Structure formats: structure tokens, C-alpha cells
Amino acid sequence: ADGCPSELFRQYDAHPSNDFVDAPYVGVTCTSDELVVQANGVPHYEYVDMTPNGLQAKDHEWSVTLDPALTGDQEDVPLLGVIAFTLTGLPIYGPNEGAFPDPYGDPVYNAIVDDCLGHTAQQGEYHDHALVTACVVEEWSSGPSPIIAYALDGFAVYGPTGCLDAECSEVVEYSSGWEQTGDPETYAWDNYAFRSSEDPTILDRCNGHTGPDGDYHYHATEGFPYVLGCYSG
């Protein structure tokens, strides 16, 4: 197994505007083969009401393998609930909403997320549907993106940019291979389709690829599915 990535996680101070809720917390431990993350799901940036559900602290715990492996069989991410988590301890949901009010629509397309591309669910659980690198790793500004999240299959999620070759002679922005085919205001998955490409900057159906150093990982992209299209591990 790889080493414990605990040093990557970010414990930020509370934002002064969020004094109505607990300060953000994320705690990281590793067993011999698992990364274990506990968090209260409170963002460290200013909370903005984007839904009728007020922000509440939660009691999250996620365990993922430290030694993820490609299965050769891509598995759909669940329609609802957590698919990944950020280095700041925020859950990440898939690129669709629930049944109400716009059934299973794309929340980014529908502009119901904040500047960090998150909002609260019915029980006040804050979650991201897409990722902004600087909302996770504040000191990053340019060059290859850092890891900003981990998928529940254990593979890392990087921001959108990365090295095109092992020498990093060129930094590129990776893009999703999914294309809009209809109106994703409702039923997002029915209104995008994946098109594979020989372009090395276009990611696979799961929004990942094997990088120049030989490791598989995902990238957060500007376009749908934003974080994960499926699980590769």
C-alpha cells in the first residue's frame, strides 16, 4: 500500500460569517491498508444559502483503500449520496440532484451551487457537486493541479490541470469526454453522452486516466460529470 496521505488534508479556521455552526473539522488516520477520514462537513469559506436547507454540522466517516486497483470494469456512481470527499472533509455528490424540484437535473447547469460549487441537502448536509481547486487548496494558483479529493474507490482526484509527459514539459487542462446532448435541467445523465477520444487531454468515461508517471487518477473538470463519471477502481 502507498503511504498515509494525512499531510495532504487541510484543517482551516472557521469563516467569521459561519459563527452559527461548529468550526470545520477534519481528522485523518490510516490503518495498514485504509485511509480513514472523519469530518463535520462544515466549509471553511463563507456559507451562502443556495437551497432552503440551513447548514448543519454532520458526523462523517469515510474509509477507502490505500492501494486502489483498476478493476477493468467501470461501475456507475450512485445516483444520490456521497461518491468522494475533499481534502477539507466535505462530501462530494454526483452531477445530479434528487427527485425534487427539478428531477435529477444538473445542479451546476441549473446554477443552484455556490462559488465553490456546493450547497446543502435536505438535512443541512453541505456537499460539492463539482470542485474548484482553490476552494480546497488555497495556496494553489498555477501549474499542475494538486490532489483535492479522494473517490470512494481510493483513487485520488486532482484539479483540472496536469503534466502531459513525465518531464512535465507541458501542463495541460484535462477535459471531460462527456458532451451535452439534450437539456440537463432535468435527468442530467440522460442529457449527456460520453464520446471516447484519442486526444490525450480528454479523460475516460469515469473522468480519469493513467498519468505520465503510470498512476491512475481522476481530474475535476469544468464540464459534466465534473468529478466522477463512474468508478474505475
Image: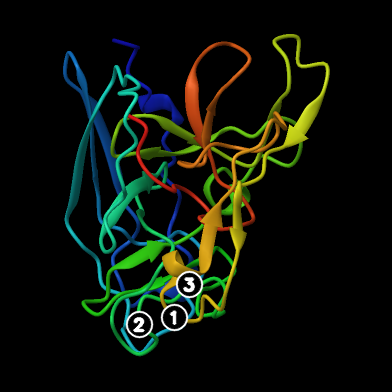
Q: Is residue 62 above or below residue 144?
A: below
Whether tag 1 and tag 2 are in contact, CB under 8 A, the answer is: yes
- Disc 1: which residue: 186
Between 217 and 32, the one lying in front of the other is 217
Check disc 1 and report its element: helix, strand or loop: loop
- The residue type indicated by label 3 comes to Asp
How much space separates mark 2 and mark 3, taking CA atoms? 9 Å
Mark 2 crowdedness (10 Å alpha carbons): few <14, some 14-19, many ≥20: some
Q: Are marks 2 and 3 in contact (CB under 8 Å)?
A: no
The location of residue 84, given as percent across then percent down, is 34, 46
The amino acid beneath tag 2 is Pro
Residue 47 in percent (x, y) is at 46, 73
Quarter of the image where the C terminus is located: top left
Going by the image, does 144 lie left or right of 53?
right
Distance in Å between CA atoms under marks 1 and 2: 5 Å
Residue at x-position 47% and y-position 22%:
216
Q: Which residue is mark 2?
A: 103
Picture quadrant of residue 198: top right
Residue 129 location (% of width, % of height):
45, 62
Who's the residue at 69% across and 10% down the image?
166
Q: Which residue is mark 3?
A: 106
Q: Earlier in the sequence, mark 3 or mark 1?
A: 3
